[in-house]
């Protein structure tokens, strides 16, 4: 049950951060406004969940290490190939988005204990 709450929190935070990063970061464009950001957040959350399942705890946002940061950037970059009409990301844009999401994730708890 707590995994779903954490997942939902991450989804909402990611959608809001994607909107913010889309406005301020070069090389990161979310098309379709809020709907596009929500769809992109779902895709990123699903890919992130799969990465956590396959690679273990070192890629989770809670570890906040270099491996988690790089994995987050890769997940964001790969998402553009799944939804190319809604998300366009350069390598620098993916790194900036992963950094901002990491900072927000450090502030907003994603694990309910």
Image: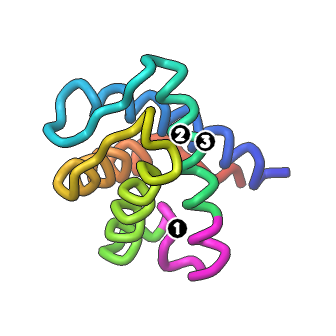
Label 1 crowd bin: few (<14), some (14–19), many (20+), radius 10 Å:
many
Disc 2, SS: helix
Residue annotated with mark 2: 41
In the image, residue 31 above or below residue 103: above
| Residue 76 image position (x, y, % from top left) | 40, 54
- First-in-chain label (3 vs 1): 3
Span highlighted in magenta in the image: 50-62
Q: Which residue shows up at 14% across the image and 38% down it?
A: 26
Label annotation for residue 60:
1
Q: Which residue shows up at 22% across the image and 51% down it?
A: 90
Q: Quadrant of the C terminus?
A: bottom right
- First-in-chain label (2 vs 1): 2
Q: In this view, does 29 lie to the left or right of 105?
A: left
User: Is 29 inside the magenta-drawn segment?
Assistant: no
Gap in Å between the C-alphas at discs 3 and 1?
16 Å
Disc 2 + disc 3, Cβ < 8 Å: yes
| Residue 108 image position (x, y, % from top left) | 48, 41
Label annotation for residue 42:
3
In the image, residue 82 above or below residue 48: above
Label 3 crowd bin: few (<14), some (14–19), many (20+), radius 10 Å:
many
Callout in the foreground (2, 1): 2
> Which residue is at the far front?
85
Disc 1, SS: loop
State the image quarter where residue 19 is shown.
top left
């Amino acid at each position: 049950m707590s995994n779903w709450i954490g997942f939902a929190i991450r989804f909402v935070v990611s959608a809001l951060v994607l909107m913010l990063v889309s406005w301020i970061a070069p090389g990161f464009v979310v098309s379709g406004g809020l709907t596009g950001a929500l769809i992109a957040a779902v895709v990123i959350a699903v890919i992130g969940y799969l990465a956590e399942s396959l690679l273990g705890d070192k890629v989770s946002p809670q570890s906040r290490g270099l491996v988690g940061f790089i994995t987050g950037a890769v997940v964001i970059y790969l998402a553009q190939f799944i939804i190319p009409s809604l998300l366009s990301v350069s390598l620098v844009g993916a790194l900036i988005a992963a950094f901002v999401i990491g900072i927000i994730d450090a502030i907003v708890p994603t694990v309910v204990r």
